[in-house]
Image (spheres, rainbow, N blue to C red):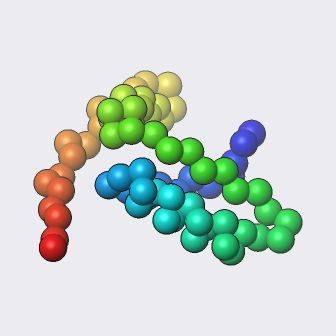
Amino acid sequence: MFQFSIYVRHCASLENAEVHKKRVKSFLPRYGKVGIICITDKQFGNIELFYGNKPQVPNTPGQQLELF
């Protein structure tokens, strides 16, 4: 087992992801382990989720809004 919990954060760009990676590195737990993986929107969209023994149809994505 690699992890006990998974947390997801969408980053609009690789530069934005680097900012968040640095922030996470700044408060790592003393005896804990943290892994960070960066994947593209397309790769994330290809994730298959299974609950029990039969695949679940993913929820239709909501409209993404961007505020300036």
Front-most of 18 and 34?
18
Q: What residue do we see at 62% from left, 55% from top?
A: 5
In this rendering, the answer to whether 49 lies above or below 3 is: above
Q: Residue furthest top?
A: 54
Indicate the position of residue 7 as horizontal and vertical percent values.
52, 57
Q: What residue do we see at 21% from left, 46% from top?
A: 61
Q: Is residue 62 left or right of residue 7?
A: left
Q: Is residue 13 left or right of residue 19?
A: left
Q: Residue furthest front?
A: 15
The quarter holding residue 56 reads top left
Q: What residue do we see at 30% from left, 37% from top?
A: 58
Front-most of 14 and 28?
14
Q: Quadrant of the C terminus?
A: bottom left
**What is the tally of numbered marks visible in this picture?**
0
Q: Is residue 56 visible?
A: no
In this rendering, the answer to whether 64 lies above or below 38 is: below
Q: Is residue 54 visible?
A: yes
Q: Quadrant of the N terminus?
A: top right
In this rendering, the answer to whether 51 lies above or below 3 is: above
The quarter holding residue 33 reads bottom right
Q: Residue furthest right?
A: 31
Q: What residue do we see at 70% from left, 56% from top?
A: 34
Indicate the position of residue 44 as horizontal and vertical percent values.
39, 37
Indicate the position of residue 2 as horizontal and vertical percent values.
72, 42
Indicate the position of residue 47 as horizontal and vertical percent values.
41, 32
The quarter holding residue 29 reads bottom right
